[in-house]
Image (cartoon, helix red, strand yellow):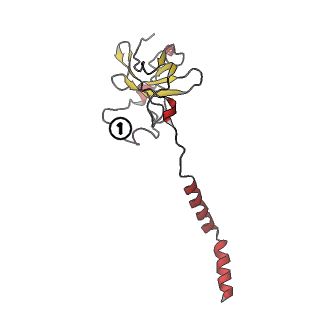
């Protein structure tokens, strides 16, 4: 009888399925804590504004405020009235203070903003009044290069300068 107990005990230690399951559980428990960003140290400033093109609101345009030295940027998207609010990422609004290059585009895609990927409203969901333009509407850039890839637009973000309206003109 003793012999059966020894064999059974040895068998359970060598069971690869049991060992793999235990390893997976240990890894999930150890990896379940995600790193946290301390947004308080960034000094974020809420930035908003309105963008028009030839005097008309520019809907569904992506706006970026980019640090010319580091390349770090905040982003936003205009609504039907051309109004935008800037986001640092999908969790926090705001722009870090300082001088920025502003880029505006009707074709730029940003993950979680207008790319159809995770972030913002869930898949297949849209908040009321947030109709997305069709692919045909965004296939051709409406904003001249001097406002996006070769942008001449600048903003100096500070606690006293938080609203930036841009009146763009077609070429």
- For residue 137, what is the image quadrant? top left
Q: Position of residue 134 (x, y in %)?
A: 39, 30
Dot 1 lies on which element? loop
**Along the viewing direction, whichever of 99 and 112 lies nearer the viewer:** 99
Q: Is residue 113 left or right of residue 68?
A: left
Residue 123 painted magenta: yes
Q: Is residue 10 left or right of residue 152?
A: right
Residue position marked by numbered label 1 in the rendering: 126
In the depicted structure, whether residue 24 falls above or below residue 122: below
Residue 8 painted magenta: no
Instruction: Report the magenta residues as a range.
Output: 120-126
**Along the viewing direction, whichever of 83 and 26 lies nearer the viewer:** 26
Q: Quadrant of the C terminus?
A: top left
Q: Quadrant of the N terminus?
A: bottom right
Residue at 34% across / 25% down in the picture? 80
In the depicted structure, whether residue 47 falls above or below residue 170: below
Residue at 50% across / 26% down in the picture? 96
Q: Main secondary structure of the magenta part?
A: loop
Residue at 45% across / 34% down in the picture? 92
């Amino acid at each position: 009888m003793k012999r059966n107990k020894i064999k059974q005990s040895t068998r359970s230690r060598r069971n690869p399925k049991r060992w793999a399951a235990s390893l997976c559980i240990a890894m999930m428990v150890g990896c379940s804590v995600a790193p946290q960003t301390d947004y308080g140290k960034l000094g974020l400033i809420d930035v908003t504004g309105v963008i028009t093109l030839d005097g008309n609101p520019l809907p569904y345009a992506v706006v970026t405020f980019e640090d010319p030295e580091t390349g770090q940027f905040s982003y936003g998207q205009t609504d039907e009235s051309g109004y935008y609010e800037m986001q640092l990422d999908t969790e926090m609004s705001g722009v870090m203070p300082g001088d920025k290059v502003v880029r505006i585009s009707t074709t730029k895609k940003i993950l979680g903003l207008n790319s159809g990927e995770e972030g913002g409203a869930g898949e297949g969901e849209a908040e009321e009044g947030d109709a997305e333009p069709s692919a045909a509407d965004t296939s051709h850039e409406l904003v001249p290069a001097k406002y996006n890839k070769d942008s001449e637009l600048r903003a100096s973000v500070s606690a006293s300068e938080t609203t930036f309206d841009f009146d763009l003109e077609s070429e």
